[in-house]
Image (cartoon, rainbow, N blue to C red):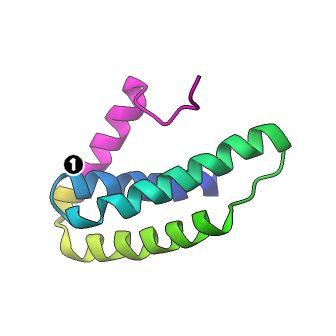
Amino acid sequence: EAWSCVVCALNVGMALCENGIGAEYEPDLVRALDGAFRAKVRSAKSGTFRLDGEAMRDIELAFHLHDAQLRLATRAEVTVAMQTVHARIDSGIVYREAA
């Protein structure tokens, strides 16, 4: 459950970037999401959930970015970002392991 909160924050941050709030930091959020996905794939294989060092750094940076975005964004902008994330989940537009 805590992991869902982490990934949700990263995805909301990405949606805010896409809507112009911290857009210049989108590559940082992509790296954080990539790191989270690596941990997910690794945990499915090993049964143990662990972030690699790069993922820890990238996710920490993304959390700082997310906090800054929330200070700048209006409530309506955050709501739209959250709706975007939920719509993507409902549509199946999520990270998947390459075939």
Task: Answer left or right for 63 relative to 46.
Answer: left
| Nearest to the observer: residue 81 or residue 40 | 40
Q: Amino acid at mark 1?
A: Val
- Name the spot of residue 57 as percent of width and height, x first: 56, 73
| Nearest to the observer: residue 67 or residue 28 | 28
- What are the residue bounds of the magenta stretch? 80-99
Q: Say if 31 sits above or below 95 in the image.
A: below
The residue shown at (84%, 43%) is 46
- Number of labelled discs? 1
The residue shown at (56%, 29%) is 98
Kindly tell me whether residue 12 is visible in this rendering: yes
- Name the spot of residue 76 as percent of width and height, x first: 16, 57
The residue shown at (31%, 49%) is 82
**Which of the image's four quarters has the C terminus?**
top right
Quadrant position of residue 12: bottom left
Task: Answer left or right for 14 relative to 77.
Answer: right
Q: Say if 18 sits above or below 59 in the image.
A: above
Task: Answer left or right for 77 relative to 1.
Answer: left
Q: Indicate yes or no whether the magenta region holds residue 95.
A: yes
| Nearest to the observer: residue 74 or residue 37 | 37
- Name the spot of residue 54 as percent of width and height, x first: 60, 66
Crowding around mark 1 (Cα neighbors within 10 Å: few <14, some 14 to 19, many 20+) is some
Q: State the predominant SS element of the stretch in magenta.
A: helix
Q: Secondary structure at mark 1?
A: helix
Task: Answer left or right for 81 relative to 88.
Answer: left
Kindly tell me whether residue 5 is visible in this rendering: no
| Residue matched to label 1 | 80
The residue shown at (53%, 59%) is 6
Q: Indicate yes or no whether the magenta region holds residue 82.
A: yes
